[in-house]
Image (cartoon, helix red, strand yellow):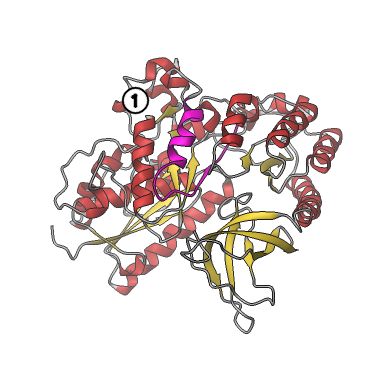
Amino acid sequence: MSSARSVAVVTLGCTRNEVDSEELAGRLASQGWTLVEDAAEADVAVVNTCGFVEQAKKDSVDALLEANELKQTGRTQKVVAVGCMAERYGEQLAAELPEADAVLGFDSYADMSTHLRNILAGERPASHVPRDRRRLLPISPSDRRGAAGAVSLPGHQQEETAEPLVPLEQVAPATGPRVVRARLDGRPWAPLKIASGCDRRCAFCAIPMFRGAFVSRAPAEIVAEGAWLAERGVKELFLVSENTTSYGKDLGDLRLVDALLPELAELPGVERVRVSYLQPAEIRPELLDAMARTPGVVPYFDISFQHASGPLLRRMRRFGDRASFLGLLEQVRDRVPEAGIRTNVIVGFPGETEEDLAELTDFLCEARLDVVGVFGYSDEDGTEAEDYEGKHDEDTIRERVERVSALVEELTAQRAADRIGTRVEVLVESVEDEGEELPRLVGRAGQQGPDVDGVTYLVDDDGGMPSLQPGDIVTATVVATEGVDLVAVPEPSTDPRGPGR
């Protein structure tokens, strides 16, 4: 293959998609493709789409259309849609979006290089035919161990269909199992996928249909990839899945994640481990203990409550209510008083009454949460709720979103202000250039997750910029807030190597 063939992988959606993109990039690099950051400089733009909710789907279509416009420059020749939206809609997406030269599903990932070569040669492969991926594996989790290898699971480091053409450093670590992944950014943190799919049947969610049944990765594979990331300068491992609290159930032991945390935290170069997406109905006291007691695991709890009205949650095919959720939060704070806690909620779900909404807002007032994502309900193709009665009109949903969002903005700003005077551990990530203002160091406290949970600005006592670099981790005292963002002053370092660790 000519080294002139280049590819850009454009990622939309969640951090799980970021892992899939980096695995795709690693596979392509191992087959001799040149990875470029800018789609305008690539022969092929591969757009890893998101198909979660309506807005995400619109963003994915916009990204594909923007990539298609690059063809007018004469440099970019082809645009290929992959990812969740491509998997979910396949032929339908291809018919409605002829600007995409191909729409490929997850089963194409293992031999993506061949597909792209053929597309560049003028072929238009048959578009992906969607199917319910839950049916590809046995219903019983324990029966999936032997069958999972026959199903494509993006981000699980499954075998390729072709041997590498070149011994690229990013796909052939010096020791341990081979890791097929290429970093697409220089951030000091990285998502690390520990499982895929979901066995829950939430009435509003389509993810299980296109991501499939829940499958855990083997602990040894996760640790090997964590070590690979650490060798490339990653200080924080962000453990991602559709449902972390289910990890290990298909391997015969739900306690495997409790043992996995210290293994990852002890890897050379790893300073922090962050756990995401805890399903409240499945949280075990032992998991909370492991998260609280393991050095290096940050005080961060991502718990997806979705609502607080018991009757409405049951209509959503979920469990819990305001009292049980407040009790769970008490358990968390008994173990980790300084915990940062985030959640998502849906308002305007079919049948939601004003009393249900009041139960939610009362819960939010009592819960003292750091971050709350507020989403208005929208029908998702193929979900149970799509056929529910009692749906609200768009204006009602919009009004409820605005009402709850305004409350959340006030509550989370107050929660951030409560941290003034406390000490936090901050991972330095970048320098924010304020134009005419002085540039500021931007990082995240242990209580802040990537991208959506706010940041911490690091300043000297006089308001200047400390002498720190991205990747440094420092202890700092919170001195002010800007909404949910924190402003903190680093403490003097006692490390002879300098202010960062």
Q: Name the residue under label 1.
A: 148
Image position, residue 139 (x, y; %): 44, 16
Instruction: Say few, some or many: other residues with alpha carbon within 10 Å of mark 1 (under 14 / 14 to 19 / 20 or more).
Output: some
Residue 262 among magenta residues: yes
Looking at the rendered image, the quarter that the N terminus falls into is: bottom left
Q: What residue type is labelled 1?
A: Ala
Q: Is 451 left, or right, of 103 in this rendering?
A: right
Image position, residue 457 (x, y; %): 63, 66
Residue appearing at x 59%, y 81% in the figure: 435
Q: Is 108 left, or right, of 283 in this rendering?
A: left
- Identify which residue, 132 or 260, lies in the foreground: 260
Image position, residue 55 (x, y; %): 58, 51
- The residue sitting at the bottom extreme is 436
Residue 278, placed above or below residue 298: above
Stretch in magenta? 256-278
Q: What element carries label 1?
A: helix
Residue 284 in view of the camera? no
- Identify which residue, 349 or 467, lies in the foreground: 467
Residue appearing at x 16%, y 63% in the figure: 3
Residue 362 in view of the camera? yes
Residue 65, placed above or below residue 197: below
Q: Is 28 left, or right, of 366 in this rendering?
A: left
- Identify which residue, 305 or 491, lies in the foreground: 491
Residue 267 among magenta residues: yes
Report the number of discs: 1
Image position, residue 84 (x, y; %): 44, 43
Residue appearing at x 55%, y 40% in the figure: 276
